[in-house]
Image (spheres, rainbow, N blue to C red):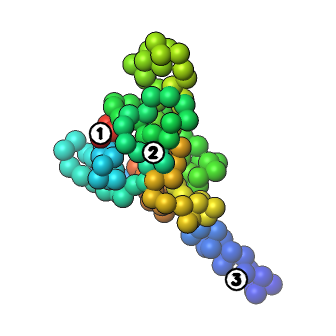
Amino acid sequence: MRIFALFLAALLVLSACSSKFQTYNGPEVTRVVVFKEQRKMYLMHHKKVLKSYDVGLGFAPAGHKQREGDGRTPEGEYKINRRNPNSEFHLSIGISYPNANDRAYAARNGFSPGGDIFIHGKPPKFAKAPNDWTAGCIAVTNREIQEVYAMVTNGTPISIYK
């Protein structure tokens, strides 16, 4: 019985250690800032950088996303607007692309602006993918998305620059 109790305790400790969900009790992330050319993302508390990450982008990273399937990562002002704890990409947080301007531009030009832009992890099946491998999303490592997922709340502004 004692061996079973030790085994059960060890199993509980291991399962707690392997959880992809973290807690964060630090300063509020007031903005996410991405610089596409530098491949950097910053979690900000007002003017102070709390964390920085190297990022991968869409497979055609130059320029602003304008249409579905163009492989570009959007540029502009958006919000974090949803979370996916069961993402194919470990964890993911949604970006409110397309905004009203993106939709209007696409409508004027007769095409879909696309959507489903996220900050997400990098699952094993993409382990050997080049740095810019997404369909327009912002990718970090699985360990990093766990931090980002814990730190960034829905409604947080995200600024994505060239």
Q: Residue at x 44, y 49 (%)?
A: 57
Q: Which of 112 and 122 is in front in this view?
A: 112
Element type where label 1 sits in the image: strand
Whole-number angstrom distance, CA of label 3 to CA of label 1: 53 Å
Residue 27, label in figure: none
Is 49 left or right of 111, judged from the image as shown?
A: left
Q: Tell me: residue 37, above or below residue 10.
A: above
Q: Residue at x 64, y 68 (%)?
A: 15
Of pointers 3 and 2, the one earlier in the residue sequence? 3
User: As drawn, which residue projects farthest toward the right?
Assistant: 1
Q: Tell me: residue 71, above or below residue 3.
A: above
Q: Name the residue under label 2.
A: 60
Of labels 3 and 1, the one closer to you: 1
Residue 17, image x and y in percent? 56, 69
Of labels 1 and 2, the one closer to you: 2
Is 124 left or right of 67, judged from the image as shown?
A: right
Residue 130, image x and y in percent? 49, 60
| Amino acid type, label 1 | Tyr
Q: Mark 1 points at which residue?
A: 161
Q: Nearer the viewer, residue 31 or 102?
A: 102
Q: Nearer the viewer, residue 27 or 70?
A: 70
Q: Mark 3 points at which residue?
A: 6
Residue 77, image x and y in percent? 34, 30
Whole-number angstrom distance, CA of label 3 to CA of label 2: 52 Å
Is 37 left or right of 59, judged from the image as shown?
A: left
- Quarter occupied by the N terminus: bottom right
Residues at discs 3 and 1 in contact (Cβ within 8 Å)? no
Q: Tell me: residue 120, above or below residue 75.
A: below
- Quarter occupied by the C terminus: top left
Q: Residue at x 52, y 48 (%)?
A: 134
Element type where label 3 sits in the image: helix
